[in-house]
Amino acid sequence: MTEGQGRVTLWGIEVFLAAAEEGSISTAARRLGVSPSAVSQQLSSLESALGAVLMDRSARPLSITPAGTMFRRHAQVILNAEAEARAELAMADLSGLTTLRLGMIEDLDAEVTPRLLTELAAELKGCRFHLETGASHHLLEQLSNRALDMVVAADATLDAPEGWREVHGLLAEPFLAVAPKGGDIGNLPLIQYTTRHLMGRQIAAHLARQNLRIGARFELDSYAPILAMVAAGAGWTILTPLALHHATRFRAEVEVHPLPFEPLARSLSLHARAGVLRDMPSDVAIRLRRLLQAQVVEPSRALWPWLGDTLRTL
């Protein structure tokens, strides 16, 4: 390395991969929790250290150069090796764990996730926590790529060999029909949860299996606006108790019923790479079941006793 040339850092590699995956400096910055200028600076430092232009930042979305494509393959290998080394060190002494990367679906970020992080932080005093919230399929892919250590997601099949992960069941919940107060579902359009996410695809597939063609004028990717539109009388929707818990301010303005056709349910689990974090995934799963029971299951059953065991911790 010549004098004045920078060094290739793991942080610079992580920033490069985030920018390459997101196709945008600003989106990569949000994902990493830093400013866009910090992302640009890291990319410039990495390119200087390598002596090659990795990205055409004038293009929208970002365009990866041939050199960037070549380096991207090596970059993922480097980060994977770093994650494996860190995990092996953690196995030796989890009390010395310095970083824990968690992925959580948005359904839990109202109360459950903050309480979990508070509990873990009290015990792992020297640990830095990195939280990523997103769709189930995205989080599971991140876990498969070793970008996350543990993930809470809706159960789904991954295009990866079985046996690489351990799965701890957390919650089983039914899908529910949510309508405006006094609203008639038969006379209202469906406000559909986006089929870009696993839950939306589950709902759409269930309707298709029963040859139900329900007019859907709206397709949204967030619970709050869906329930706001339902409360305003714009339509009805199909969601779960967790989704209703996530947007509690609308619960008094809607009615909740069992689905007016064949029931549908889903399950949530904690996923981790098998054998890497010893007993920690099992311990976190126990904590989550306790929090879900207190924060979601018991309040929901009190509001809608007819739910019974269709909503339960696993």
Image (cartoon, rainbow, N blue to C red):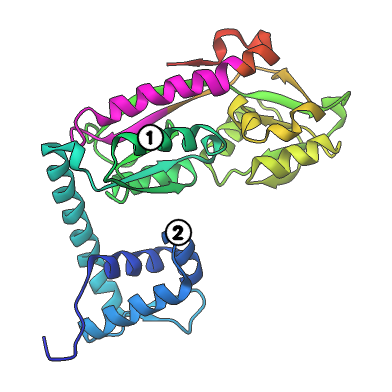
Q: Position of residue 309 (x, y in %)?
A: 55, 9
Q: Give the label on residue 31, or none.
A: 2
Residue 293 belongs to magenta span:
yes
Q: Position of residue 163 (x, y in %)?
A: 22, 31
Question: Which badge, 2 or 1, comes first in the chain's sequence?
Answer: 2
Residue 4 position (above or below residue 287) = below
Q: Position of residue 186 (x, y in %)?
A: 84, 26
Q: Amino acid at mark 2?
A: Arg
> Magenta part of the protein: which range?
269-298
Looking at the image, which is closer to me, 226 or 117? 117
Magenta span: chief secondary structure = helix
Q: Position of residue 240 (x, y in %)?
A: 61, 27
Residue picked out by circle 1: 157
Q: Amino acid at mark 1?
A: Thr
Q: Give the label on residue 233, or none.
A: none
Looking at the image, which is closer to me, 146 or 278? 278
Q: Quadrant of residue 174?
A: top right
Name the residue located 32 percent from the left edge and 44 percent from the top edge: 143
**Residue contact at pointers 2 and 1, CB within 8 angstroms:** no
Name the residue located 48 percent from the left edge and 38 percent from the top edge: 114
